[in-house]
């Protein structure tokens, strides 16, 4: 991994020269959830294509730009779209943008995704606060030589998702008048959706939602000692829990249908973070 830190440094230096002030929060916007970045105040956008070491996502629903702006006085760097390991990137490349935002100053990660419901009590359109995860991707961004400038060889994962931030999200959902589910996110490599047997496996392992992102970013964030809030938009019943075949158009459609609740949740979280800081 030698050289990764220097590459992160170069990307952060380029961005520092382009943005008015450094972010305190990195916000990753998943499939169909990217619009939130357009609501930030004083937004300045930079295309991934213009940032050294960044790669554009090849997935529809992922715009591929960083938007710097503010909400409730909180300085946010929003990733409109992310890259995934299933696109052919190694895990370190997947987390490169996150490490760059940390290098710029972000110490909190708010990570969002679209996910299938493995918990039979969940229905499409539910929002879920991630309490923990299962990394079932078979890889990690920390494989290889460790660079102590990022963090320790063996980072602690016992509170991967901050209880303090989860409580803030629960309070924000109560203020907005809807129920926020909570549960364990199972991160798969993809890109094929799971088989019904795999969804049953996830259930038996204690998973409530299943998706193809987030876990690598959260491992890298904990390595960097960032506090993490994870939010899933349940866009479909997991495979085998309904008769309907799974498809990405449905995922994007449901994610955009819950837009107003998702915006209210994030706005509420940032309002409380703004007061707390
Ligand atoms: N499985 C994996 N990833 C997903 C799903 C799913 O059912 N829905 C949205 N992203």
Image (cartoon, rainbow, N blue to C red):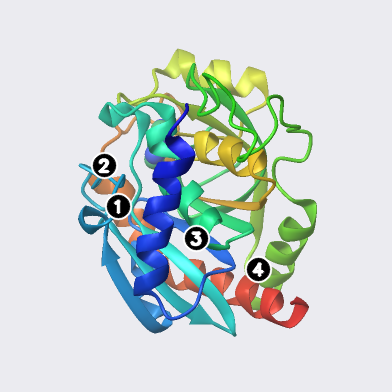
The residue singled out by tag 3 in the image is 27
Residue at 44 percent of width and 32 percent of height: 92
Q: Judge the density around disc 2: few (<14), some (14-19), many (≥20) Cα neighbours within 10 Å.
A: some
Quick one: label 3 or label 4, which is nearer the N terminus?
3
Pointer 4 with pointer 1, Cβ within 8 A: no
Question: Separation of disc 2 and disc 4 at Cα?
Answer: 27 Å
Question: Separation of disc 3 and disc 2 at Cα?
Answer: 22 Å
Question: Separation of disc 4 and disc 1 at Cα?
Answer: 22 Å
Quick one: label 2 or label 4, which is nearer the N terminus?
4
Element assignment for label 3: strand
Quick one: label 3 or label 2, which is nearer the N terminus?
3
Residue 96 percent coordinates (x, y): 42, 43
Residue 174 percent coordinates (x, y): 70, 71
Q: Quadrant of residue 132?
A: top right
Element assignment for label 1: helix
Pointer 2 with pointer 4, Cβ within 8 A: no
Pointer 2 with pointer 1, Cβ within 8 A: yes
Report the disc number at residue 243: none
Report the disc number at residue 248: 2
Q: Nearer the viewer, residue 117 or 184?
A: 184
Q: Is residue 97 above or below residue 38?
A: above
Element assignment for label 2: helix
Pair 3/4: label in front:
3
Label 2 C-beta lies within 8 Å of the nearest ligand 1 atom:
yes
User: Along the horizontal axis of the image, is 4 left or right of 50?
Assistant: right
Q: Is residue 118 above or below residue 100?
A: above
Q: Nearer the viewer, residue 22 or 195?
A: 22
The residue singled out by tag 4 in the image is 173
The residue singled out by tag 1 in the image is 252
Question: Separation of disc 3 and disc 1 at Cα?
Answer: 19 Å
């Amino acid at each position: 991994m030698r050289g990764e830190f220097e590459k992160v440094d170069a990307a952060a230096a380029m961005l520092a020269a382009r943005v008015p002030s450094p972010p305190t929060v990195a916000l990753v916007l998943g499939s169909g959830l990217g619009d939130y970045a357009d609501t930030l105040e004083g937004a300045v956008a930079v295309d991934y294509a213009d940032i050294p070491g960044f790669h554009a996502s090849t997935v529809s629903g992922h715009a591929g730009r960083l938007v710097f702006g503010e909400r409730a006085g909180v300085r946010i760097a929003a990733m409109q779209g992310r890259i995934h390991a299933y696109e052919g990137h190694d895990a370190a490349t997947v987390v490169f943008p996150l490490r760059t935002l940390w290098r710029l100053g972000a110490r909190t990660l708010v990570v969002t995704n679209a996910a299938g419901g493995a918990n039979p009590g969940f229905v499409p359109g539910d929002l879920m606060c991630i309490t923990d995860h299962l990394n079932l991707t078979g890889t990690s961004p920390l494989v290889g030589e460790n660079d102590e400038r990022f963090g320790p060889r063996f980072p602690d994962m016992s509170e991967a998702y901050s209880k303090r931030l989860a409580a803030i999200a629960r309070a924000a959902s109560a203020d907005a008048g809807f129920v926020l589910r909570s549960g364990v996110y199972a991160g798969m490599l993809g890109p094929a959706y799971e088989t019904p047997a795999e969804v049953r496996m996830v259930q038996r392992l204690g998973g409530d939602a299943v998706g193809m992102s987030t876990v690598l970013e959260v491992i890298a964030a904990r390595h960097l000692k960032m506090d993490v809030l994870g939010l899933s938009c349940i866009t479909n019943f997991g495979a085998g829990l309904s008769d309907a075949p799974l498809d990405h158009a449905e995922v994007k459609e449901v994610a955009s249908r819950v837009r107003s609740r998702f915006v209210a949740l994030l706005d509420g979280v940032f309002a409380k973070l703004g007061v707390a800081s």
